[in-house]
Amino acid sequence: MGIKIIIHRKVMKAMKVQVKLFATFRNGRWKMQEFEYPHDIPVSTVLKDLSLSEEDVGMVLVNGIHKNPKSQLHDHDVLALLPQYKPSKH
């Protein structure tokens, strides 16, 4: 008699995150775009992918709720990024 070993693999599909950019973040970019990421990534991963530093970001909203760059994103979240307010010099 042989021993059968069955290995169960959990297949993880990529999650979808809709990213909305506002104000100067749209310059040379887009208004809204959907991305696929591995499950449960922090907002900071999206910032890096967009070449934005945490210091550039004035407000992070996830599904309309104020969050921070360390907050985790989940499947079908909507991430809104607004730039830091920098008054113009006259």
Image: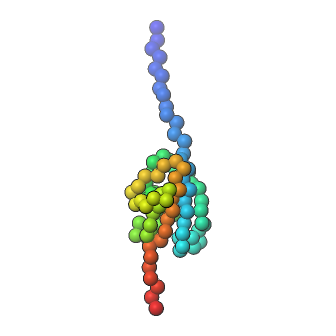
Q: List x then y, in percent, for residue 82.
A: 49, 68
Residue 53 visible to the viewer: no
Residue displayed at 54% across by 73% down: 23
Image height of 78 relative to 89, above or below = above
Figure check: 51 above or below 5? below
Colouring rule applied to residues: rainbow
Q: Above or below — where is 8 with respect to 33?
A: above
Q: Nearer the viewer, residue 73 or 12?
A: 73
Q: Nearer the viewer, residue 52 or 78?
A: 78
- The residue nearer to you, when weighing 63 against 11, is 63
Residue 33 picture location, percent across and down: 59, 59
Residue at 51% x, 39% y is 12
Residue 2, given in percent of the width and then of the height, sits at 46, 11
Q: Quadrant of residue 28?
A: bottom right
Q: Which residue extends farthest bottom? A: 90
Residue at far front of view = 64
Left/right of residue 56 with respect to residue 28 in the rendered view: left
**Image coords of residue 52 (percent x, y):** 47, 67
Give the residue displayed 55% in from the left and 63% down from the top: 20
Count every numbered label the image shows and give the total: 0
Residue 14 relative to residue 45: left or right: right
Q: Residue at x 48, y 22 (%)?
A: 6
Q: Determine the residue located farthest toward the top in the rendered image.
A: 1
Residue 80 in view in this figure: yes
